[in-house]
Image (spheres, rainbow, N blue to C red):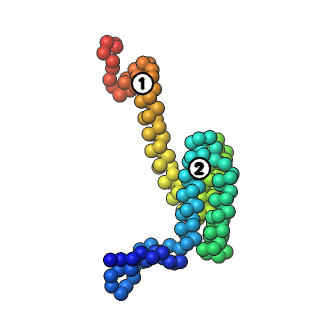
Amino acid sequence: EGLVALGSEALVFFGAGNYSMTILDISFASLGKLAVLSSLAVGACAWDLRTRRIPDALTVPAAIAGMALSLAEGGWSGAGWSLAGLIAGGGLFLTLVIWWEVGAGDMKMMAAAGTLLGPAGIIRGILVGVILGGFWALAWMAASSTSAAARSPAAYTRVSDSIGTRRAGSG
């Protein structure tokens, strides 16, 4: 009935009639940014979980790609937008690096993400990351306390006391 076509300017749905409707106005540069950002996020997560580090081999190419794609998409103003995102993302996380709350790899990852999202987008990205990180931390704590309770009777007592239950025979 319909045909979806990806052009250089928009994803367009051609219906049965003589009309076209834009579903998603997105350029190839924007699709490239999405691909780089997704690769950066998945790669950083995998590396960080495995080694507790985010390497420059991941962040530097992502930042260069973000600058190049922004330049291709918006000319010099796009490159300026990308640079502002790099400064915003890296600058916000620089404070956390100074306070020893995160590592420098996290700061470089957010700077690279800033080249792809721009200054306003990186703020939204950080907020989403904080929310997702909070859920991840809660899930990790729940899994850790459950496995600790299974291994240790003392841990079981602490966990059961904290939820208001006691083992039979305990005071």
Name the quadrant of the C terminus. top left
Q: Quadrant of the N terminus?
A: bottom left
Q: Is residue 29 above or below residue 167?
A: below
Q: Is any atom of residue 87 visible in this view?
A: no
| Cα–Cα span, label 2 and label 1 | 32 Å
Residue at the disc numbered 2: 44
Give me the residue at 59% from left, 44% from top: 48
Front residue of 137/33: it is: 33
Task: Judge the density around disc 2: few (<14), some (14-19), many (≥20) Cα neighbours within 10 Å.
Answer: many
Q: Position of residue 12 (x, y in %)?
A: 43, 77
Where in the figure is residue 85, as x and y percent of width and height? Answer: 61, 62
Residue type beneath disc 1: Ala
Residue under pointer 1:
150
Residue appearing at x 58%, y 71% in the figure? 29
Q: Residue furthest bottom?
A: 18
The percent coordinates of residue 15 (x first, y second) are 35, 80
Q: Residue at x 42, y 24 (%)?
A: 150
Q: Is residue 8 left or right of residue 19?
A: right
